[in-house]
Image (cartoon, grey):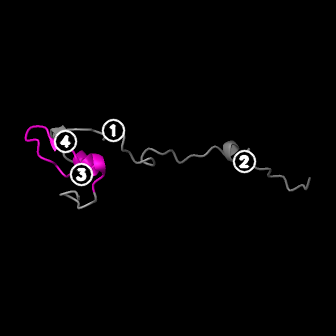
Amino acid sequence: MHCIICDKNLKDHESVRRHAITEEFLDICDGCLRDLPGLPTKGEQVLDTVRDPFEDADDTVEVESVTNCYNLNDEDD
């Protein structure tokens, strides 16, 4: 099944989502559903758990956390 808005393949939980009033299958992916606030849905809602892991990523890296696992000395042991 495909999303009726963007034509992306639907995941299992997306393909069984229904309209809360008409109980018709919505056939809308999570991404497109986010763009339709207020649409009454019925069924498993996973919108809060489906997130881009890099969306709020902090680009800073602590040097010690990276270098602690490496011996940066040029000396041979």
Question: From mark 3 to mark 4, how far is it between C-alphas?
Answer: 10 Å
Which circle marks residue 32 in the picture?
3
Q: Residues within 10 Å of mark 4 (few under 14, many from 20)?
A: few
Q: Which residue is drawn at 11% across and 46% down?
A: 24
Residue, far right = 77
Indicate the secondary structure of the residue bearing disc 3: helix
Q: Which amino acid does label 4 sit on?
A: Pro
Q: What residue type is labelled 1?
A: Asp
Instruction: Give the image quarter of residue 65.
Output: top right
Indicate the secondary structure of the residue bearing disc 4: loop
Disc on the earlier residue, 4 or 1: 4
Residue 34 x %, y % = 25, 45
Disc on the earlier residue, 3 or 2: 3
Q: Name the residue under label 2.
A: 67
Residue 23 x %, y % = 11, 41
Disc on the earlier residue, 2 or 1: 1
Residue, far left = 22
Instruction: Point out the frontmost of discs 3 and 2.
Output: 3
Instruction: Point out the frontmost of discs 4 and 1.
Output: 1
Q: Mark 1 points at which residue?
A: 48
Disc on the earlier residue, 3 or 4: 3
Indicate the secondary structure of the residue bearing disc 2: helix
- Which stretch is magenta? 10-34
Q: Name the residue under label 4.
A: 37
Is residue 23 shown in magenta? yes
Q: Residues within 10 Å of mark 2 (few under 14, many from 20)?
A: few
Indicate the secondary structure of the residue bearing disc 1: loop
Question: From mark 4 to mark 1, how far is it between C-alphas?
Answer: 13 Å
Question: From mark 3 to mark 2, how far is it between C-alphas?
Answer: 42 Å
Question: From mark 3 to mark 1, how far is it between C-alphas?
Answer: 14 Å
Residue 69 x %, y % = 73, 46
Q: Residues within 10 Å of mark 3 (few under 14, many from 20)?
A: some
